[in-house]
């Protein structure tokens, strides 16, 4: 669905508080195993010298992925239903995860 652009992601938007920025698309943060697409960012391959744009991008993408994984780890520690595969329709899984997030907050 990502390749065919059928996920129903929102359209690209300008960053809030920035008058001169160009619209940025919504995207998934992936690792190097995924194929690059318009809505999926993955790190640059290889090692880059300190301070280069590629190394900075790889670091920031890695930190973003780590924050998401940590947040889901905290959520799954409290709601055990998130620790195992759910045998439900995708729409129901979405509701379960959203309910867990609302209850956590």
Image: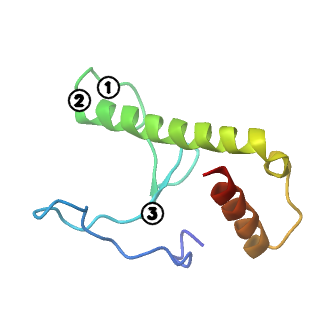
Task: Kindly give the residue lying farthest to the top in the view shown.
Answer: 50
- Closest to the observer, 83 or 102: 102
Q: Could you say whether the residue bearing mark 1 is in a helix, strand or loop?
A: loop
Looking at the image, residue 46 sits to the left or right of residue 86; the answer is left
Q: Circle 2: is it few (<14), some (14-19), or many (20+) Cα within 10 Å? A: few
Which of marks 2 and 3 precedes in the sequence? 3
- Closest to the observer, 45 or 40: 40
Task: Kindly give the residue lying farthest to the right in the view shown.
Answer: 87
Which of the labelled discs sits on residue 48, or is there none?
Answer: 1
Q: CA distance from mark 1 to mark 2?
A: 7 Å
Looking at the image, residue 82 sits to the left or right of residue 60; the answer is right
Above or below, comparing residue 88 to residue 57 in the picture = below
Dividing the picture into quadrants, the one containing residue 51 is top left
Dividing the picture into quadrants, the one containing residue 92 is bottom right
Q: Which quadrant would the N terminus be assigned to in this image?
A: bottom right
The answer to whether the residues at label 1 and label 2 have Cβ atoms under 8 Å apart is yes
Q: Could you say whether the residue bearing mark 2 is in a helix, strand or loop?
A: loop
Q: Which residue is mark 2?
A: 52
Looking at the image, residue 8 sits to the left or right of residue 21; the answer is right
- Closest to the observer, 11 or 75: 75
User: What residue is drawn where x is 24% and y is 62%?
Assistant: 16
Which of the labelled discs sits on residue 68, or is there none?
Answer: none
User: What residue is drawn where x is 64% and y is 59%?
Assistant: 102
Q: CA distance from mark 3 to mark 2?
A: 24 Å
Q: Which residue is mark 3?
A: 39
């Amino acid at each position: 669905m990502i390749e065919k652009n059928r996920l129903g992601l929102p359209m690209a938007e300008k960053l809030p508080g920035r008058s001169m920025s160009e619209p940025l698309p919504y995207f998934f943060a992936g690792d190097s195993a995924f194929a690059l697409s318009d809505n999926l960012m993955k790190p640059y391959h290889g090692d880059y010298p300190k301070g280069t744009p590629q190394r900075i991008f790889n670091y920031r993408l890695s930190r973003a992925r780590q924050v998401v994984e940590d947040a889901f780890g905290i959520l799954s520690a409290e709601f055990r239903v998130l620790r195992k595969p759910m045998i439900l329709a995708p729409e129901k899984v979405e509701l379960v995860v959203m309910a867990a997030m609302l209850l956590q907050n």
